[in-house]
Amino acid sequence: MAALLELKNVTKVYTRGVLSRASTTALNDVSLTLAENEPTIVTVAGESGSGKTTLAMLLLGFIAPSAGQILYQGQDISRLGGAARMAFRREVQAVFQDPFAVFNPFYTVDHLLTVPIKKFKLATSAKQARERMEEALTAVGLRPEDILGRFPHQLSGGQRQRINVARALVLKPKLLVADEPVSMVDASLRANILETLRGLQKNHGVSIIYITHDLTTAFHIAKSIIVLYRGSVMEAGDVDAVIKHPQHPYTRLLIDSIPWPDLNRRWGETEIKAKEMEQSAQGSGCKFLSRCPFAMNQCVTPAPLFRMSEHQAASCYLYEQYPQVHSDQLTELLPV
Ligand code: SF4
């Protein structure tokens, strides 16, 4: 059976300026496979500029890779046409950061949910459309009778973001690309929405690519994680192993900047230090070279992934005693 989604050595390069042709590699040689019969949640984590949003745009087919291929059920998404293209558009859905962006203040929630149903001709009657809306709202933990008929200003931020998820869900997607879905929601509601997303994977068989800069939420939602830095995979594997025992110096820096409850540590202290250290590293070596306290001569050449356990590998010469993993084998590191 063909995989649900497959990234094959995907690279995205942005070029600026007609004369200078300056270019930035936003994503470098990423391969990843999501199985159709094993719905899973994979976190893609990194700071801004890590390439995680570029990855989301590529997965959704909004932009094309500069090299490599993205296959949906065995077909290159750039060549999908007719019914196959409609199926991809319906089955791969996005949930974005801003729960306000999709709402038009003049329309009720019903309108927002009816538009995709009509567009993809998913109901033959108003009754069937209503049932589909109610089903989606219930799946995200909302009571349809509390929500339908309401205007956006009558809803809380948490309700809006869940409606956003429900809007994707009316289409019965197979894959959700959730780009920072809880970053604009109150902390008290985050766990709730993350739990809703987990429920979609467990009870509705939806795979989720969860994109975030926030490793604490990654820990709560996903089984596996890919840590990106400046477009390259720094570390990948089981979320528990990577967050509790980070190996790559960059992952360690990210974990150190999480404000775990500690009265002796000032919030943002490590982050500020990291920002001060940041320089734009030129050249072709390890992307983390300019920030790395362990840098050595060989780091002028990018490190491959070294696998220190079944479900953990880091792209760093500190671990060169371990077997190398080719970038094509990234998926093998990720538990389902
Ligand atoms: Fe640091 Fe070198 Fe490892 Fe890169 S490869 S993270 S520069 S030690």
Image (tube, rainbow, N blue to C red):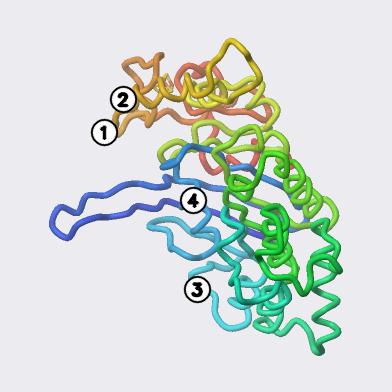
Task: Name the foreground residue: 58 vs 134.
Answer: 134
Closer to viewer: mark 1 or mark 4: 4
Q: Circle 3 is placed at which residue position?
A: 79
Q: Is residue 152 visible to us here?
A: yes
| Residue 68 picture location, percent across and down | 45, 56
Q: Which residue is mark 1?
A: 283
Residue 195 figure quarter: top right
Specify few, some or many for label 3: CA neighbours under 10 Å numbering under 14, 14-19, or 20 or more. Answer: few
Reading the image, the residue beneath label 2 is: 300
Q: In the rendered structure, find residue 178 and report the number of the disc placed on it.
A: none
Badge 4 is on which residue?
A: 53
Hey, what amino acid is under mark 2? Val
**What SS does tag 3 mark?**
helix
Disc 1 residue type? Gly
Label whose residue precedes the other's in the sequence (2 or 4) = 4
Residue 259: x and y in percent read: 59, 24
Residue depicted at x 54% and y 54%: 7
Is residue 243 depicted above or below 122 in this figure?
above
Could you tell whether 83 is left or right of 138 in the image? left
Closer to viewer: mark 2 or mark 4: 4
Tell me if label 2 and label 1 are in contact, CB under 8 Å.
yes
Residue 299, by quadrant, is top left
| Distance (Cα) linking label 1 and label 4 | 23 Å
Q: Secondary structure at mark 4?
A: helix
Distance of mark 1 from mark 3, alpha carbons? 34 Å
